[in-house]
Structures are given as C-alpha cells and as structure tokens.
Image: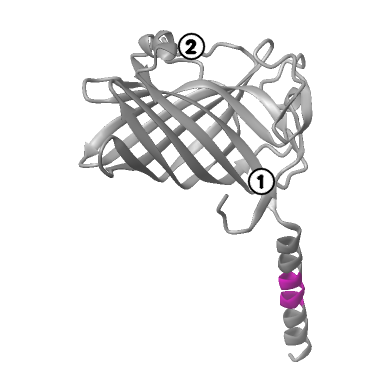
Amino acid sequence: MGSAFAAVNWNGTANYTVAPGAQLDEEAVGPFDTYDMGAGVVLLKNTGGNNYNGFYQSFVTNHELASTSVNAPKLNNTYELTMAANFTQTVTPVGGSSSLINVNGGTFNLYFDSSVDRNFGADTGFTDGASILSGTIIGGTGSAVSSGSMIFGVTDITVKVDSYNVAVFEPDTITDAGGIFTLRLGSPFDAALLGSVSSVQGNAVNSGDFLFAADGNIALAVPEAETYGMMLAGLGLVGFMVSRRRGSL
C-alpha cells in the first residue's frame, strides 16, 4: 500500500448516528479496518489507443477486522454506504489473451445515506448521500485474461485519503487506503446485474465500451509508529531551531 508514509491498517470505529443526515436509527460499528464492497459495476470508455476513462460505483456489504466480518445489522436496512470512483487507466496487451492494467490516477468518495435507495438499473442513489471519506487514487496495477467471450481481471489500487468526517471515524488517524478488485465481463453469474445497467454515473453504456461486474475491498491505513516518531522528532527540531533563532535576535 503506497503513500507518503509507510502504512499499517487503521483499526477503529465508525459512528454513523452522527453522520450528516443521520436519523439516529443507524449504529456505531467497530472495531474494523476494511470495507467489503458488494457486486458493483465498472464502465470503461476508450479515449484512444490503450487508454480508458473508468467509472465505478458499488455499496458496502460488510465491515471487516483482520478479514473477519464485524456485526453491523442495520447496514443496508436503515442506512447504506455507497462508493463512487472516477479513474484513468491503460490496458496493454502482452500476447495471447493476457493484458496488463495500469491505473494512472483518479478520485473516490464513500457516501453515507439514511435512505437505502441505490439502484444500478436506474443509475441512481449512489452519490445522493453525504460524503464521509474521500481521496485520491494514486495508482494501481493488475492483469486481465480473456477466455472466449469472458474477461477476468484483478487490480490492486493505492489511495491517499484526503478528507473524512472526524465525528464519524475514531480514532481520526486515517491517511491512506488500498484495495483489491476483481473484474468480470461475460460471466453468466453477472448477467442480471450487467443486463440492467445502461449508464454509470450518468455515462451511457455505448457500443465499444466495456461494462464489468466488480467485487473488492478497501482497507484503511495509518502511518506506522516509527513514522509518527520521525514526524514528532522533526517537529521538535523545528521548534528548537525557532527557539534558537528567537534567542539570537
């Protein structure tokens, strides 16, 4: 998981009863370190050559701690958590039926909504809540392989968390995140989902586009303890230098 700091998994709680628009019938969940996403969709639009613009939207099905599900009985009953992301990527054929995937950058938002109203077919309900966590997709790598009319891929992305609701998340030490997503096109198991989708984030699915089903997770991260020590030592040195400079005036 790349970032400006070395990172380890964040371990904390999220109190959704204090999120913007909460109706007080939500819950506090934790401790957890990962959001497990349900089956979502990725739309890829070619922008020339091997380059694509990507649009992703999905919803959280579970909170996890060390890969174990954390109890959150009200999730997707009295409230929902949805995610939307925009990104650019390059897909490079490497011979035969294989390709390499490079995610070049993008943005993402995690939304809280007190109404469970997401709808893939109508392309609504994914961004109408309050953003409680957002960030920049720094990059990512992966691969894909085609088999007949089906394509399967895996992508590992790195994220810098730019902002989050400090009233919701405790402790407020989140700096980074990372995710692993699987992509599927042409699988009969996804036919009902993909068959209902005609647009993603308002972008129509046109001939020549690729529409994938996507599963994945987002693990939240914090700087390592050693990094905190270096940061504090640096601040102490700055304070010492300022003190010396003032003393010499």
- Above/below status of 53 relative to 29: below
Secondary element at tag 2: loop
Q: Mark 1 vs mark 2: which is more N-terminal?
A: 2
Magenta range: 233-239
Instruction: Give the residue at x 70% y 37%.
Output: 33
The residue positioned 39% from the left and 39% from the top of the image is 143
Nearer the observer, 180 or 42: 180
Q: Nearer the viewer, mark 1 or mark 2?
A: 1
Split into 4 quadrants, where in the image is the C terminus?
Answer: bottom right
Quarter-of-image position of residue 205? top left
Residue located farthest toward the bottom when viewing the structure as drawn: 248
Is residue 245 magenta-colored?
Answer: no
User: What's the residue type where badge 1 is placed?
Assistant: Ala
Q: Nearer the viewer, residue 184 or 168?
A: 184
In this rendering, would 32 be left or right of 138?
Answer: right
Q: Is residue 80 above or below residue 51?
A: above
Instruction: Give the number of the disc on residue 213.
Output: none
Q: Which residue is mark 2?
A: 119
Q: Position of residue 108 (x, y in %)?
A: 50, 36
Disc 1 crowd rating (10 Å Cα; few below 14, some 14-19, many 20+) is many
Residue 30, image x, y percentages: 78, 30
- Where does label 1 land, which residue? 221
Q: Main secondary structure of the magenta part?
A: helix
**Colour basis:** one colour
Q: Amino acid at mark 2?
A: Asn
Q: 178 left or right of 145?
A: right
Could you say where residue 23 lies in the image, as x and y percent from the top left? Answer: 72, 15
